[in-house]
Every structure is written in structure tokens, then in C-alpha cells.
Image: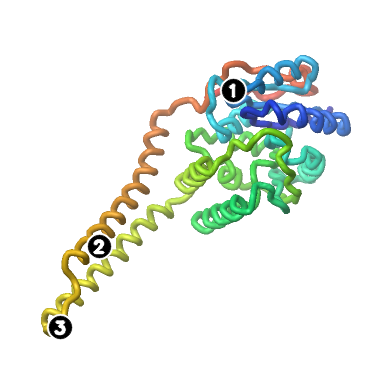
Amino acid sequence: MKKLITVIIPAYNEEKSLPLLFDRLENLVNTNRSYNFELLFINDGSKDKTLSILQQTAKTNPCISYINFSRNFGKEIAVAAGIDHANGDAVVIMDADGQEPPELIPKMIKWWEKGYDDVYARRKRYRGGRFNHLTSQLYYRTLQKTTRIPIQVDTGDFRLFSRRCILALREFREAERQNKALFSWIGYNKKEVFFDQDKRQAGESKWGFWSRVNLAIDGFTSFTTAPLRLASILGFVVAFLAFIYIIVEVVQVLCGLDRFGGYPTLLAAVLFLGGVQLISLGIIGEYVGRIFAETKNRPLYLIEKYHKAKVVNNGDKAKQKTTIQ
């Protein structure tokens, strides 16, 4: 029996990139006939012609499955939906912008067949700009040092999972997700492969500065309590400095020394303490907000249409059914 490989590809306004990606994926399928491929696209509420391109291509390509969301839910949720509906014995996650080479997938499959559960691709060359590269490195190294989970550095979503990894990832239903940290959390046998990140083939990146900031905040608040601990440490430091200052003031009064103070000193102290308090409240608020979101227990996503590939419908072996939670 041929093994089925599902390739999950989230897409948001990728009408310019998809035709170029289809050519590379078609070459992947045609040159690896010993496997069946399911190309599972997640249309994350695109406002361009992404959906119509997927619909037209699916009519002639039996390997293509697609899920159309009712609206935009974000890439992290799109990946979760792909994991929920992946039918493969192994599952590959990659972007639709062409920066991650489908040509690397056969190498990932070989390592999977040797017993590895998570074959992740690490970038040797980063094409996102020097500033983005440096901030990405700083973020993941900081996250790695503030949590007990070993986070892979210079690694995105481009990776292959075994079936048991996929079943494990389906257990995570939190609304505020950071998939890269989740991928590290589940553990299992991991294998690193390297690749050179290509330039974006067409279109524009959907990851602006604030999108990256929001993703970083989600990562910290989802997998570490270090910000809360930092706020506590900052409070102790400020209290200690205030105590030292009080002692200095008392000594100056008892010894009849000249004192430096007055309105400017008082204003500076009040503003500093107020800033510390606001920062601490903001950090606490981030965690409380996420608790509030999780207690609602809303579905992660809503599907407007799901088209399953013919290669899955007529596959070599029955697949476990999945449900939307």
C-alpha cells in the first residue's frame, strides 16, 4: 500500500503565489510516485481570488483538498484546522509564498521512514530582512531561556510530523496559540534538516511589524510565566531602592547634611512608580485576557466549505475521522 503524505498549506490573499506553487507541488507529486499526496489548502478568509483558484485547480487535480473559513481566523488557527483534517500517514506544514522549498519534502520523508516523528527545517539563510532576522533570533532565544520547553531556533512551521504527533497536536484546543512552541511541547523524536530560504515568489508578506509583536506576546503568555516573575522582581527592586533612599534621607536629617529633593524629586519618584505599576498591571492583564478568552470555550474556527481530495476518498487505507471542536 502507498503511504499518504498530507501537505498543509495555509493561504491568505495568495492569488499571485498559488500558480507558481502549484507547478512545484505538481513536480513533487510526479517525481515521488511511491507515495500518495494530499495537498490540503486552508483558505483563511482571503479577499482576493485565492478561493476561486483553489476551486478551479481542484477540478483537475485529484490531490487537492481545501478548507474555506467563514472569515479570517489567522495563520495559527489555519494550521490547527489543517492538523484536524489531515488524513496522511505523515503531515508536512509549509507556507504558500514559495519561500519554503517543496523539493525538501522527499528528504523529510526519508528521515520519517527512519523513525523520526518531527523532521523540522531550519533556515541557513533568512530572506525576511536583517531586522526581522535579528528580532526573530532574539525572540526565540529569549523564549527558550524563560521556559523549560526546548524551542527550536531559526525554525518556522516548515516540518514533517508523524501520525502520532498529529494525534497529539489535536488534543490542544486553546484559542491563543503559538504553534511553534506547541510543536516543541509534544516532544517525540526530532530531526533537524537545513535549507536556504528563498525570496517570496509573488505578492506581499502578510506579516507586518505589529503582527510579529502580537505573535511574540502570544508565545510568551502561552508558554512561560517569566513576564509575571519579571514584574515581581521589578517591584522588589523598586521597593529596595525606595528603602535605601529613605535611609539616606534619615541620615541626612540626623547629620544635618544638605538634602537634595523638592518638587522635581517627588515628581520623578511618582512617575517612576506609576510607570512600574502600569507595566505590572499590563502584564497581568495580558494573562487575565487570555484566561477570559479560554473560558468562553468558543470553536477555534468555522468552515464555510470543505473539499476532500479524490486521492483521499479513494485512498489505499481507511483514515480516522476527525471532528471540528
Q: Secondary structure at mark 2?
A: helix
Locate the N terminus and report the quarter of the image it occupies.
Answer: top right
Q: 36 or 240, which lies in front?
A: 240
Upstream in the sequence, badge 1 or badge 3? 1
Q: CA distance from mark 1 to mark 3?
A: 71 Å
> Hey, what amino acid is under mark 2?
Ala
Residue 85, position in %: x, y?
64, 26
**Alpha carbon distance from label 1 to label 2:** 50 Å
User: Mark 3 belongs to which amino acid?
Assistant: Leu
* 131 vs 173, nearest the viewer: 131
In the rendered image, which residue does mark 3 sit on? 257
The alpha-carbon separation of the residues under discs 2 and 3 comes to 22 Å
Residue neighbourhood size for the residue with mark 2, other residues' Cα within 10 Å, grouped as few (<14), some (14–19), many (≥20): few
Residue 324: image x %, image y %? 55, 23
Q: Secondary structure at mark 1?
A: loop
Q: Which residue is mark 2?
A: 268
Task: Identify the residue at horizontal 38%, vertical 53% (top origin).
Answer: 228
**Would residue 93 be seen by someone viewing this image from the given angle?**
no
For the residues bearing labels 1 and 3, Cβ distance under 8 angstroms: no
Q: Earlier in the sequence, mark 1 or mark 2?
A: 1
Q: Which residue is mark 1?
A: 47
Residue 136 falls left or right of residue 163: left
